[in-house]
Amino acid sequence: MTRNARLANEAWEALFRAQTAIVRELEQSDVWADLPPRDYGVLYALSTAPEGKRITELGEDVLLTQPGLSRLFVRLEKSGLVQRFPDPDDKRVSRMRLTPAGAALQRRVGARHAMQVADAMTRTLDAGKLALLRDLCRELAATPHNSTAPEERTPQP
């Protein structure tokens, strides 16, 4: 294994373990108001889209499969937190959006969750490290999935 490959794997392992530890801490808190964190993720994703989202768009935001998201959405719809409406661009599909009750719950839980995230992240990271972490993660997320790092590419003759 090359030095860059080893370092990349160590960095991935560290990132994965940090994310897992923080998610566990956040999920075990009492901020959720009887709303599972995955359900909150859907409410949050919809809170950023006043025009609503198709289920495929929502799946990209919350990282759930379409069948899993469909079941979750039915549960949220029955609870009166979300609603379907016809997509103005394609009448064959629906869009989803928050109801007023869903928006109110998202804001209430979101405010507590944001404070909890801030507490967890600032426990050991100062503003400079937080900005660096944010920027590095955005860069990783923006990298096309099918490309390889420049130093790992096979040279062309």
Image (cartoon, grey):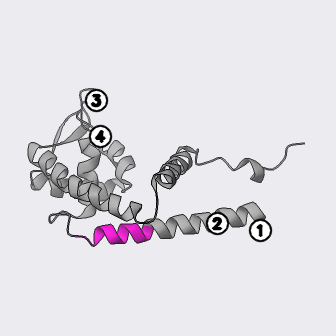
Instruction: Residue 19: give x, y in percent of width and height.
Output: 45, 65
Q: CA distance from mark 1 to mark 3?
A: 50 Å
Numbered disc 1: secondary structure: loop
Whichever of callouts 4 and 2 sits on the residue coming sooner in the sequence is: 2
Numbered disc 4: secondary structure: loop
Whichever of callouts 3 and 2 sits on the residue coming sooner in the sequence is: 2
Answer few, some or many: residues within 10 Å of disc 3's Cα (few below 14, many 20 plus, some between 14 and 19): few
Q: Mark 3: which amino acid?
A: Asp
Q: Quadrant of residue 121?
A: bottom left
Give the number of the mark in front: 3 or 2.
Answer: 2
User: Which residue in the protein does label 1 denote?
Assistant: 1
User: Which residue in the protein does label 3 denote?
Assistant: 90
Q: Residue at x 18, y 62 (%)?
A: 35
Q: Residue at x 15, y 64 (%)?
A: 33
Instruction: Residue 44: give x, y in percent of width and height.
Output: 26, 49
User: Which residue in the protein does label 2 denote?
Assistant: 9
Whichever of callouts 1 and 3 sits on the residue coming sooner in the sequence is: 1
Numbered disc 3: secondary structure: loop
Magenta range: 20-29
Q: Quadrant of residue 112?
A: bottom left
Q: CA distance from mark 4 to mark 2?
A: 35 Å
Give the number of the mark in front: 1 or 3.
Answer: 1
Secondary structure mostly seen in magenta is helix
Q: CA distance from mark 1 to mark 2?
A: 10 Å
Dot 1 and dot 2 residues touching (CB under 8 Å) = yes
Number of numbered discs present?
4
